[in-house]
Amino acid sequence: MANAEHSGTTEVQARLRAARLALWLVAAVLAVREVAVVLRTPRGERLTDLETWVGPDGVLHVKGSLYDSTQFTGTPFGGLVLKPLTRAAEQALGWGWTFGTLLLVVALGLVAARALPQPVGRRTALLAAPVAISLLMLSLPVRNTLYLGQTSIIPVLLVLVACFAVRGERASGLLVGLAAALQPTVLLFAALLWCTGRRRGALTSAATFAAGTALAWAALPHDSYTYWVHHIAGTGLGGPADDLANQSLHGLLLRQGMTGPLEISLFLALGAAVAALGVRRAVRFARDGQLLLAVAITGCAAIAVSPTTWQHQLLWVLLAVVGRVGKRASDRYVWPVAVIVVMTLPTTMLLPHIATLYPLRDNLVLLAALAAATVIPFLSRTSPHYQAPIPTESAAPVPTRFRHVPLLPFLRRVLTRPNLLLELLLLRVTYAAYQQVRLAATGGTNPAGRATAEKHGQQIFDLERLLHIDIEHWVNHTVVKVDWLRNFFDFYYESFHFVVPLSVLAVLYWRRPVDYRWARASLGFATLLALVGFWLYPLAPPRLMPALGIIDTVHGVQDFSKPDYGTLTALTNQYAAMPSLHFGWSLWCGVVIAIMAPRWWMKGLGLLHPFFTVSAIVATGNHWVLDAVGGAAVVAGGFGLSYLFQGPRARVVAVAARRDEERADGLVEPSARGAGTRVNPG
C-alpha cells in the first residue's frame, strides 16, 4: 500500500514537472516571438514612440517644449527621467529598450504569480508563473508596449512590487509615488493604502508624487504648465481624446457626441463615482486577503477616471483575471475567459460588424474595466463556494471499443447545460478566428492566391472528368433556365448556411445539454480540419474559373481579375472552396438531427438539408462536387476526433421502473448525482 501511494505521488510530481517545463517553454516561445516581431519590423515603423522621444529628431532632443507637438504623452517627470537616454546610441537603445521591457514583463509575471490569494495549491503555485508570463506576452497592452517602445509596464510593476515585494510602508509609498509621477491616476492607490490602514505609506506616496512633480516643474516649468494646466493632465496628447484607442470615460462620452461643459461635468461626476466605488470594493477585498484583486480593481478604476487611457496602459484589466466569480463550477470560467479574450484579441473579432453594436465594440475594454471596478460579484474568501464551487453533474464513463479511448478522460459528459455567456463568447471568437485564417490562407488578399487557386481548380476539374462526375456546367445551366428553381437555390445558399447549424445548437443547448457538448465538439473539430484544407489547398470555385462558362447565379457576371461578391468582398477568401463547409455544416446538421430526433419524419427532414445544400452549391456555381466530398470527409473526421478525445456519445434516458427497483434494493441513493437517469452508449 505504501509503495503504491509513493508511486502515485512520484507520478503526479513527474507530471507536474513536465507540465511546468512545457508552460515555461510556451512562455519562452511567446517572448521570442514578440521580440522577433519588433526586430523584424523595418526601422522607422517599430518603436515609434521611443523614436519620437529620444531619437535624433525626438522631442527630448529639441530645446523647445516637450509638448510643441502631441507626440510626447508622458508627464514632465517622465520626460525628465528619459532625457539622459538621448545620449545613447540609437540602435543600442532600441535593442536595450526591447529586451529591458521584456525583462520587466517577466518580473511582472513573477510578482503577480507570487501574489495570488491564499491558500494556493501546490499545482497552482508551480504553474502560476509561466501561465502569468504567457498571458502577459499575449495581451494587447504588452504587445503594444513592445512595438511602440512605451513605458507603461513600469507603473504597473512599481505598484505590484510596492504591494507584494518590499517591506515597510515608506518603501511601498515611495514606489507608488514614483509610479504616480509617471502615470498620475495611479495616485488612486494612495487612497487604497490609506483606507487599508497603511496611512504612512499613503502619505509617502502622495509626498513622492508631489516631490517628483515639483522637481519636474522646477526643471521644466513651461512643459509642466503645458501638461498640467493647458492639457489638463495630458488630455489631447498623443491623439484626439475621442479616438477609439482612448479607453476612458472621457473618450466614451466624446464618442457619444457630448462636448463642452456638459461632457466635462458628466465625466467628473462619473469619474468620482467610479473612483469611490472602486476604492471601496478594493478595500473590502484587500481586507479579505485578496490584495492582488484589490490592486486590479483600483487599476481598473484608474483606467476609467483618467482623461486619456491608451491601449498600452490597459494592463490593469488583465490582473482582474484572479477574481473568482460564480458559485457553480460551470460558471467559474466565464470571467477569466472573458478577461483573457478581451485583453488578447482585437474587439473587432469579439462582436459582429453590426452598426447597433459599434458603441459596445468601440468601448469594450473600458466596459470590462468598469465592470471589474464596480459590479462584478467577486467571491469573498469566506464564501463556502470560494474553494469548493457547486460541482458539475457528470455522466458515468461509457465503455469504449478501444483501450486508449478517450484520450482525455477528464472531459466528462456533463449532464447540465454549459454557461450561455461562455458558449456565446467562444462561438464568436472561434468564428472570428475561422474568418481570419480563411482569408490568411491566400496571403491576406484574394488576388494573391488567384493563380494557385485556378491551377488547383483545373486539377479538380480534370479529376472529375476522369471520374465522370463533372456535372457542374450541366446542373448550373439547367437551373439557370428555370427561374423559380434558380431563385430557390440562390435563397437556400445564402440563407441556411448559418441559420440551421445555429438553430440545431440552440435546440440541443436547451433540450439536450449532454448531446450539445458532443455535437459542438464534433462541429468544432470539423471546422478546424476544414481550415487546414483551406490553408494547404486554395481552390477556385467553378464560378471563378473563366474557361468553364459557369454562371454565378448569386452575384452575377464576374470580372475574374476583381471578382465582386457583395459586401464581404474584402473580408472573405473566395478561394476557400475545398472542403465545402456549406455542405460540411449541413451534413453535420443532418447527422445530428437523424441521430437525436424522436420522430422518423424529423430525421427525414434533417437529412433533406444536406441534400438541398449540395444541390445549391453545385447549381449556383460555388463548389465542385469533390468539394462536397471534402466537406463530408472533415465532418467524419470531426465526429472521429470527438470520439477519440472524449469517448462515445452519452445518451441519458429515464428508466423510472429500473430506478425504483434499484432504489428499493438499496443500490441507488435517492440523492445520488444523476439520480433517475442511466447513461448508455449512443
Image (cartoon, rainbow, N blue to C red):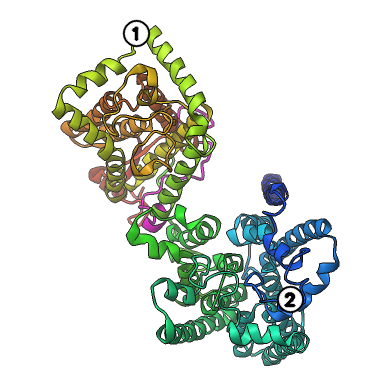
Q: Nearer the viewer, residue 672 or 567?
A: 567
Q: How many marks?
A: 2
Q: Which residue is mark 2?
A: 79
Indicate the position of residue 299 as horizontal and vertical percent values. Answer: 58, 75
Q: Nearer the viewer, residue 12 or 163?
A: 163
Query: What span is in magenta?
Result: 399-423
Q: Regarding mark 1 in the picture, which secondary structure is present there?
A: loop
Q: Tell me the residue at 43%/66% (across/down).
A: 327
Residue 320 appears in view = yes
The residue carrying pointer 1 sits among few (fewer than 14), some (14 to 19) or many (20 or more) residues within 10 Å by Cα, namely few
Q: Is residue 403 magenta?
A: yes
Q: Regarding mark 2 in the picture, which secondary structure is present there?
A: helix
Q: Tell me the residue at 38%/43% (across/down).
A: 568
Q: Nearer the viewer, mark 1 or mark 2?
A: 2
Amino acid type at image mark 2: Gly
The answer to whether 123 is drawn above or below residue 298 in the figure is: above
The numbered disc on residue 242 is none
Indicate the position of residue 348 as horizontal and vertical percent values. Answer: 45, 55
Q: In screen coordinates, is 245 left or right of 357?
A: right
Q: Which residue is mark 1?
A: 468
Secondary structure of the magenta portion, mostly? Answer: loop
Indicate the position of residue 221 as horizontal and vertical percent values. Answer: 72, 88
Amino acid type at image mark 1: His
